[in-house]
Amino acid sequence: MVKPYFLIGLAAVSLGLAATDLTSAQAATWHAGTPKVLRHTWFHNGKGDNKAYITYSKTKSTGNLFGLDEGSEHYYRLPGYGLKKLKYRSLGHHVYQLSGIQYSPKGGKVQFDGQRMTYKLKVQKSQLHFYKGYHNYGRHTTFPTMKAPAIF
């Protein structure tokens, strides 16, 4: 005779396996927008003029280099471009794949305007690590910043 505890245990294990498969399937699916942990402005504190920013909102990314105001020796954000209609999927261990349609800043045109771009990054507490050739970005600048000069 089969003990009722065995049936309860078998049912619990079956449900546990089903939940694990469902969780894996959900992680492999694409979600609209950006992960909440990514929504922030991130900065690349490069040497010389190699300073950049990227801002993630709920639905798009915007970024570019910083310009230098010679008079004040402060840096300001150049008009941004990036990806709109973002979607993402989790690859595990805080690694995400993002995909979106590239757009240009007002009055400008970037090389891949209107094309879908996809890339992978890892989100850490105070740093973004981009795979495939991009620099790491942190939460804060190490250089003086200002609002854009009046010419922008």
Image: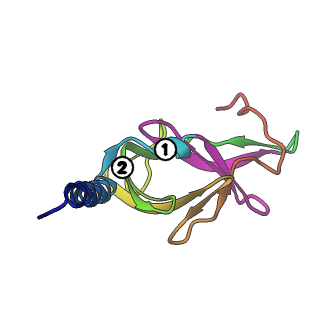
What range is drawn magenta here? 40-69
- The amino acid type of the residue labelled 2 equals Gly
**Residue 56 versus residue 138 in the image, above or below:** above
**Residue under the image location 29 percent in, 57 percent down:** 16
| Residue 69 rendering spot, x and y as whole percentages | 80, 42
| Residue 129 rendering spot, x and y as whole percentages | 59, 63
Give the main secondary structure of the magenta stretch. strand
- The amino acid type of the residue labelled 1 equals Ser
- Res. 27 image quadrant: bottom left
Magenta-colored stretch includes residue 79? no
What separation in Å lies between label 1 and label 2 (alpha carbons)?
9 Å
Name the quarter where the C terminus is drawn. top right
Asked if residue 128 lies left or right of residue 67, the reply is: left
Q: Which residue is mark 1?
A: 61
Name the quarter where the N terminus is drawn. bottom left
Furthest residue in direction top, as rendered: 150
| Residue 77 rendering spot, x and y as whole percentages | 67, 41
Front position in the image: 77 or 84: 84
Q: Secondary structure at mark 1?
A: strand
